[in-house]
Image (spheres, helix red, strand yellow):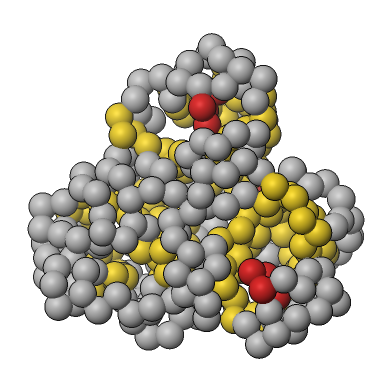
Amino acid sequence: MSYTNGLDKPEDYFNTKLYTGNGSTQSITGVNFQPDLIWLKNRDGAFAHILTDIVRGNTKSLGSNTTDAEVTATNRITSFDSDGFSVGNAGGSINANAQNIVAWNWLADNTSGSSNTDGSITSTVSANTTSGFSIVTYTGNNTDNATVGHGLGSVPSMVITKSRSVVSLTGWMTKHKDLASNYNVALNRTDAAWNPSSNGWVGDLNSSSVFTLKNGTTNGNNANQSGATYIAYCFAEKKGFSKFGSYTGNGSTDGTFVYTGFKPAFVMIKRTDAAFGWFIFDTKRDTFNVASKYLLPYASDAEASLTTLDILSNGFKIRQSLTYINASGGTYIYMAFASNPFVTSTGVPTTAR
């Protein structure tokens, strides 16, 4: 098996960067590209997750662990640079002196986006169809079954939305391809997957051009309030680069093996049949197996460690029996991005750690 989709170097589209804050200003280099979505977290302290993207602009940020509206600050991300980004003196999650910080970075198309009229709501989209990632902004109209163009050119596997201009009732409404019809999860919450039924959610993923917004019986606050502005991060699965799937736990330390077709660089997991939160692992914070260092998108908690999973050449294997990651019969969804494809387009296999 070989991959011929131009993604032999996944680090040209997704990369994790670690740095140490200096309490002043600094340029963070070594990302390998100009990032269009930067997700930052202070690993040492209880500070909010910070997400900034090129479409909203470097001064705009949202926290994955809150329902709050967008914040404008000129001393957080001060610029998107050709090999990374620059940070200001905001401290906290951004640049606190002597604090260890992680930045997860994705490439879209390096522009602030262009108008997309594929849906009933006109959107602004910065999309990378090669890697299957797009950043979308739109203004809600409180109409059930409204559609929004995502620009991917293929059916998304996962869409994450958040209100920018209003405090949302639930927060980051997230649709994953392996959730039941009309069911969502929230990036900022621990709830099991549910049908929101009243205050708006992302509908089933079945179109190569648009995603659908469901309003329910009350209003669309979470995803489609009239006049409110929203951000959406959309992901389509690409062989050898990204994988969006599900697995069933077995309750053993000799846990489930999950095949991705590549050596993961980043894995985010959420249990969906019970109330447990999201967990993020990456191979920059854990360079050897077993991967144990995790961060929680739904909480401001500092990094913690627990023997959890092995990162393998073609997927990951659970090494923990706890219910948050591997309950017997429990169901879990995940998103993963590659450090290396299992076999490159030149036929060279990757190796385990």
Tell me if I can see residue 332 in this picture: yes
Estimate the x, y position of residue 310 in percent, counting from the top left.
82, 63
Tell me if I can see residue 114 in this picture: no
Q: Is 284 placed left or right of 90 in the picture? A: right
Q: Is residue 324 above or below residue 62?
A: below
Q: Residue 144 falls in which quadrant of the image?
A: bottom left
Residue at (26, 55) in percent of width and height: 168
Estimate the x, y position of residue 181 in percent, counting from the top left.
37, 85
Residue at (62, 82) in percent of width and height: 330
Estimate the x, y position of residue 36 in percent, counting from the top left.
46, 41
Estimate the x, y position of residue 153 in percent, counting from the top left.
40, 67
Q: Residue 285 falls in which quadrant of the image?
A: top right
Given residues 148 and 289, the one toward you in this image is 289
Q: Is 131 placed left or right of 203 in the picture? A: right
Q: Is 57 placed left or right of 192 in the picture? A: left
Work out which quarter of the rendered image holds the N terminus and state it: bottom right
Residue at (21, 69) in percent of width and height: 199
Number of callouts in the render?
0
Work out which quarter of the rendered image holds the C terminus and state it: bottom right
Residue at (55, 23) in percent of width and height: 95
